[in-house]
Image: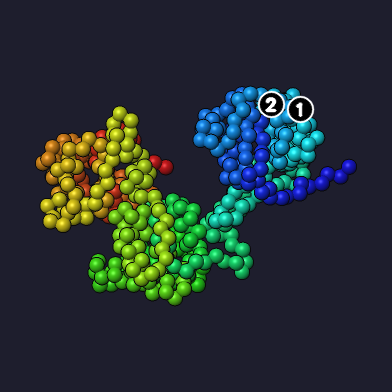
Amino acid sequence: MAEHPAYPVGLRLTGRRVVVLGGGQVAQRRLPALIAAGADVLLVSPEATPSVEAMADAGEITWLRRPYAEGDLSGAWYALIATSDAVANATASAEAEAHRVWCVRSDDADQATAWTPATGTSEGVTVAVLTTSARGRDPRHTAAIRDAVVAGLSDGTLVAPHHRTRTPGVALVGGGPGDPDLITVRGRRLLAEADVVIADRLGPRDLLAELPPHVEVIDAAKIPYGRYMAQEAINNALIEHAKQGKSVVRLKGGDPFVFGRGMEEVQALAEAGIPCTVVPGISSSISVPAAAGIPVTHRGVAHEFTVVSGHVAPDDARSLVDWPAMARLRGTLVVLMGVDKIGKIAETLIAHGKAPETPVALVQEGTTAAQRRVDATLATVAETVRAEAVKPPAVIVIGAVVAAAPTTEQP
């Protein structure tokens, strides 16, 4: 008899009974989607993984703590059989067949009446991949296809013809520390949908080359009139383009709200009545040290880390940092934008009790091909910066975690 392909269909399970037999790894993987679908889930199993048990404790599923017994599928619309008992699986499968309950079996797909596709979601679209025959049924193959399609939809490289998603307004996107692979999936997708991109110098510049030719790219670093007026000009550019009905992405380095002046832009847009979506980014304060092999916290070494701006010196009246308090902290101190002020910072920390031999690492151009790490101590860091010609952007890490980590560059 000729083999027929499976018929793909989407089950609407809200409020409908779904019975899951077995509380192991298969159930752990499948239950979240069933819960998200609104199913009335009954788990029948004498044991369960901690994650499955947590779902029961939270009231997301009902758990009967016993082995399967005939009659458990009564009233079910759908069943997932995933126990380690082959006899119980076969008996439950026969019950499902007798009661016309669509049934998935983790131990023997050929004896099942339904197969679970490899699924993924992207912005309201569910991708489900099924192979067409038993001979070609390879879960790794279907998962790889699923992943490729979802990734394409997520990062904008796969867009349905004549159906390009675009939302007028502004998306404030944190681009991460520099490596284009470290932008979030959502940030990359919004870039692919943009009409206008206003980019910072420290954003992931390589991503701009992927934009279609019709996208207008504005280099925020080249907007004239000095620092304050430049921010005002950026705000005005965001508002002007958004009022024209365009989809605007403000691409910033790191996270928009970690010394990124992101809130100033959000406030300006709100005053102008422009909708704004904030997409967090990976902050350089933790990612750059990690890329250089430095953990900002480490068991038995540092139970805290503090991130401060070093763009003004400790003795500058504009500084809002309590440097004496920083000197008293026992954890890790991460300084951003502080390369040219590190001498004054080190002097101040030492003057208020920080040990001169406290390890310091400077990670320049972190996560990029030009990354390099320079090590020193509080006592030597000023001279080391001069001797090694350390330039911004560089993240400065002060504390014992520097010595606890390898001093060689990470691959």
The answer to whether residue 383 is seen in the rendering is: no
The disc, 1 or 2, on the residue closer to the chain's N-terminal end is 2
At x 36% / y 66%, what residue is drawn? Answer: 270
> Which quarter of the picture shows residue 115?
top right
Locate residue 154, reporting x and y percent.
Answer: 54, 55
**Colour approach in the figure:** rainbow
Of 91 and 283, nearer the camera is 91
Mark 1–mark 2 distance (CA, rounded to whole Å):
9 Å
SS label for mark 2: loop
Q: Residues within 10 Å of mark 1 (few under 14, many from 20)?
A: some
Whether pointer 1 and pointer 2 mark residues with C-beta atoms closer than 8 Å, the reply is: yes
Q: Is residue 307 above or below residue 154?
A: above
Whether residue 72 is visible here, answered yes or no, is yes
Q: Which amino acid type is marked by label 1?
A: Thr
Location of the C terminus by quadrant is: top left
Q: Looking at the figure, which quarter contains the N terminus?
A: top right
Nearer to the camera, 44 or 347: 44
* Amino acid carrying mark 2 in the image: Tyr
The answer to whether residue 375 is left or right of residue 189 is: left
Q: Is residue 119 left or right of residue 286?
A: right
At x 42%, y 56%, the residue is 279
Q: What label sits on residue 233 in the rendered view? A: none
Q: Secondary structure at mark 1?
A: helix
Query: 136 above or below 244?
Result: above
Percent from the top left, x then y, of residue 70? Answer: 74, 27
Residue on which disc 2 sits? 68
**Which residue is rendered at x = 37% and y = 46% of the image?**
287
Give the number of the disc on residue 91: 1
Which residue does the image show at 17% across and 38% down from the upper left?
328
Between 199 and 228, the one nearer to me in the picture:
228
